Structure formats: structure tokens, C-alpha cells
Image (spheres, rainbow, N blue to C red):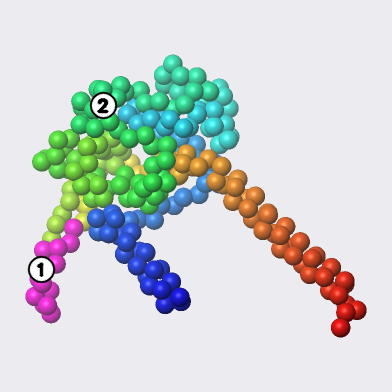
Amino acid sequence: MKTILAIVFLLLPVAGLAEEGGQALDRAPIDLNDKISLQRGAAAFMNHCLNCHSASVMRYARLKDLGLTEDQIRDNLIFTEAKVGDTMTAAMDPKIAKATFGVVPPDLSLAARSRSPDWLYTYLRGFYRDPNSKTGWNNTVFPNVAMPHVLWEYQGSQALHVDEKMDDNTGDMKVTSKLVLELPGKMSPLEYDRYTADLVNYLAYMGEPGEASRRHWGILVLFFLAGFFVLTLLLKHEYWKDVR
């Protein structure tokens, strides 16, 4: 059994890498307790994602859990006729979206749970110019993606440089690729990484808004059970101390 478990744990990273088409994923700096980051991520989501993507299981009112008031939500994060109690619906008509992109943009309510925050973080930083694609963009973790790079003004324009080199020992041809920033954007690479990290942090929060609270209460329950176990053990010894 130990051998089987060891093999399973060894194969998990390989399976994850194969699922992403061989692209190594960058670690997303997720912190669901950082409300400032979540507020910035919510603003980025409303400004750039909600135009095409819906979040049908999330209500604007839930943003109050991030420390925002109804007035702040209404004045700064709602750009349609929606009310604070409404769900987050895309501004673009699905028929227009399908005619434009070829597919209806998916709902992002559970994107972080289905794809993983690491995948989203790498994806948002993996766009590069591709004149052969319909939108003029491609992506390292999602080849031939229909979505254009909506954040290109912030990141700038990247190019995918592919190098081929023969291994001196085996004679095999090794192909390596890397993204190179050719045209800088409004943000520095570090600022853009922070911007996308905040956005992914919010997407992770949106997938399960109660996760941080659930973990907090889970830790408290474990401490309670540990204390109760000690108390029970002492009580057991007290009852059985005269039994030989």
C-alpha cells in the first residue's frame, strides 16, 4: 500500500503537467485573507472580464464581505443598470459574442476551481502576438484561444521565441520556447504580475466566497476537538484509576 501511494504522489505532478499540454504553471500568490488585494481584483474583474464573461452565481452584494459598502459597489463597480442585489451578468449579448469570437465566453464563477488559480495566473501572463490567429493573439497554456488579450495595454506585446538545439550527447533536437516582451505596456512586468495576481485572487475567492471563513472555523473546531480529547482522556483515567 505504501508503494502504491508513493507512485500515485509521484505521478500527480506529471498528470497535471500533461493536462496543461506540457506547459509548466507559475505559482499564483493567492491570499483570500488579503481584502485589499481582493478589492483590487474585483475592480479588475468588473472593468475587463464582466464585459464578455458572466459570473452567474455571484451577486454584487457579496462584495460587502470584502469591506466595501453598497454605495462603493454601486458607484465604482457596477457599470450597467444592475442593482447591488443582482447577479453579475455579462454586458455583451451572447449572440454577439458568439458571432465575434466563435464561441460564447464561459461563465467565470467557478473558473478558479475548474482550472486552478495557477493555470489562470499563467494564462493571463501567457499571451503573445500571433499573426496567424483570428484575433492576432495566442497563448502558451491555451493554444489557439478565441479570446483576445484584453490586458495587452497594461502588459504590452510579447513574442514567442522558439529555439532548436541539438543535444551533443544524444543527438536529439531539443526545442525550447520563451516569451519576450517586445513592446512595453503601461505597467512594468512586476506591476502587471501584481495586477493579474489580484485578479486571480478574486477569481479564487469568487469560486468559494466562504472558503476563508470555513478554514478559520475548521481550525477552531480542530483545537476544540483536541482539547476535548485531552479532557476525555483525563476523565477516562479518573474513572478507571481504581480498576486493575
Residue span colored magenta: 164-177
80 vs 234, left or right, is left
Q: Dot 1: within a 10 Å radius of its alpha carbon, few (fewer than 14), some, or many (20 or more) residues?
A: few
Determine contact: label 2, label 1, CB under 8 Å.
Answer: no
Q: Which residue is mark 1?
A: 173
Q: Residue at x 54, y 32 (%)?
A: 62
Q: Quadrant of the N terminus?
A: bottom left
Q: Is residue 9 magenta?
A: no
Q: Nearer the viewer, residue 100 or 137?
A: 100
Q: Nearer the viewer, residue 220 or 78?
A: 220
Q: Residue furthest front?
A: 244
**Whole-percent x, y for residue 180 in the image:** 21, 52
- Is 233 situated above or below 194? below
**Whole-percent x, y for residue 108 in the image:** 38, 37
Q: Give the CA separation, mark 2 to mark 1.
A: 42 Å
141 vs 44, left or right, is left
Q: Amino acid at mark 2?
A: Ala
Let me know if residue 110 appears in the view. Answer: yes
**Whole-percent x, y for residue 242 in the image:** 91, 79
Q: Residue at x 28, y 35 (%)?
A: 150
Q: Residue furthest top?
A: 81
Q: Amino acid at mark 1?
A: Met
Q: Residue at x 20, y 31 (%)?
A: 102
Looking at the rendered structure, the secondary structure element under dot 2 is helix
Q: Which residue is mark 2?
A: 97
Q: Is residue 173 magenta?
A: yes
Looking at the rendered structure, the secondary structure element under dot 1 is strand
Q: Residue at x 50, y 29 (%)?
A: 59
**Whole-percent x, y for residue 148 in the image:** 23, 36
